[in-house]
Amino acid sequence: MKKAAITTLGCKTNQFESAAMVESLAKMDYTIVPFTDCADIYVINTCTVTAKSDAESRRLIRRARRQNPSAKIVVTGCYAQLAHGEIRELPGVSIILGNNEKKDLVGILEELEQEQIVRVSDIAKERRADAIVLETFSEHTRAFLQVQNGCDSYCSYCIVPHVRGSSRSVMPDEAVDGVMAFAGKGFKEVVLTGIHLGMYGIDLDPRTSLLDLLSAIEECSVIARLRIGSLEPAEIPDSLITFLAASKIVCPHLHIPLQSGDDRILGSMNRHYTTRFYRETIEKIMVAIPDVCIGTDIIAGFPGETDKEFNNTMKFLESLPLAYFHVFPFSPRAQTPAAGMSGQVHGSVVKERAKILRELSNAKKMSYYNRFLGRELPVLVQGREPDGSFKGLSRNYIPVRMIGDGNPLNTEVKATIREVDKEFVRGEMIS
């Protein structure tokens, strides 16, 4: 029996698409092994958001070739979509697939007779988002469901619209069917993912919205927990906040990218909001959902960011009730306006600013976790640690380690929080 290994870089959309490839390979009697093992086929599902992710993709290609020089190496994802000409020159690469073509992986493997196959279509011409419903998932408690793909925003630093195409949505009935299918297989939480999730439905006829989709899923009453991915600040209307506050299934966890806490830099980034608007949005959410976990994205060292603008960002972040940040050192990407902007920040300064932002993020996270000391949280049990404790995830996105009895895997239990660790909290499971 042939062995296949797959590794994934980047976003939850990529993770979902990797899970679909794993499932299709397993159906063709491939044994799925860790990427560190010797395999007959290695699949690298790449990201190209930063130069670092490009370099990591190339490193993984070299690693696969060292592990088994005779293996077939498949490179797909956003880096493959953007730079397939560059990748085809790398030794050992057998197949290069664009983002549209990765779903055809198994069929392409079967026709592999020539030395190298390159299948990368023009993603800008794609107008459909086909539903992909998985029969299984490597994580047995939470499943990811892609309901939207592509982006029309064209932020000045972002390569994503060039490698994912325009915004397109899965039909609502297909998305609901996907949630129901996961629920029927025993999953207790489904995470809705997309490249630009807040734009869900605007491309469909009749036009619909993310709120409409969430309402339809809630009406079905089939899943215990529903989590939504990243939402842009300008795409969270009051009606959505009201719905989230009243929902019995949508988890109180939102990821709302900021990118900069300085209005001039936000303008250069082509972000269509101000810091005042962002603050007002966060405050409205906090009033409606007091224990909500809100995370954000921040770019360190965007072109033109002087010490003044960076300090504005720090002060703004310090003043907000955020639970964590994802910090991205600015990386110039070809084909984006930011790559050619004046005022490029020296790499050492970018690195130092990113470090400072991550330290603030850690402090914010500890402050958020400490709010729940002595309180009870509903926790979905995901597994067991070597020390015998159970690990799980609260509805408001706090990783929990618990002591308790029985076998509560894939059930939601209540836990009293007793201690805060660096990356999680510790508690006692309530019988």
Image (spheres, grey):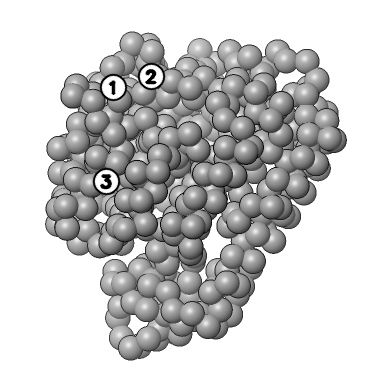
Residue 88 in view, yes or no: no
Question: Closer to the N terminus: mark 2 or mark 1?
Answer: 2
Amino acid type at circle 2 is Ser
Horizontal and vertical percent for residue 105? 29, 29
Which mark is drawn over residue 166?
2
The residue that disc 3 covers is 214
- For the point 42% across and 40% down, the residue is 236
In the image, residue 82 sits, relative to residue 326, either above or below, namely above
In this view of the protein, which residue sits in the foreground, 383 or 273?
Answer: 273
Q: Are marks 3 and 2 in contact (CB under 8 Å)?
A: no
The residue that disc 1 covers is 203
- For the point 17% across and 58% down, the residue is 221
Quadrant of residue 337 within the rendered picture: top right
In the image, residue 376 sits, relative to residue 316, either above or below, namely below
Estimate the spatial distance between the alpha carbons at disc 2 and disc 1, rounded to whole Å.
10 Å
User: Regarding mark 3 in the picture, which secondary structure is present there?
Assistant: helix
User: Regarding mark 2 in the picture, which secondary structure is present there?
Assistant: loop
Which mark is drawn over residue 290?
none
User: Regarding mark 1 in the picture, which secondary structure is present there?
Assistant: loop
Estimate the spatial distance between the alpha carbons at disc 1 and disc 3, rounded to whole Å.
17 Å
In this view of the protein, which residue sits in the foreground, 29 or 170?
Answer: 170
Q: Nearer the viewer, mark 2 or mark 1?
A: 1
In this view of the protein, which residue sits in the foreground, 263 or 167?
Answer: 263
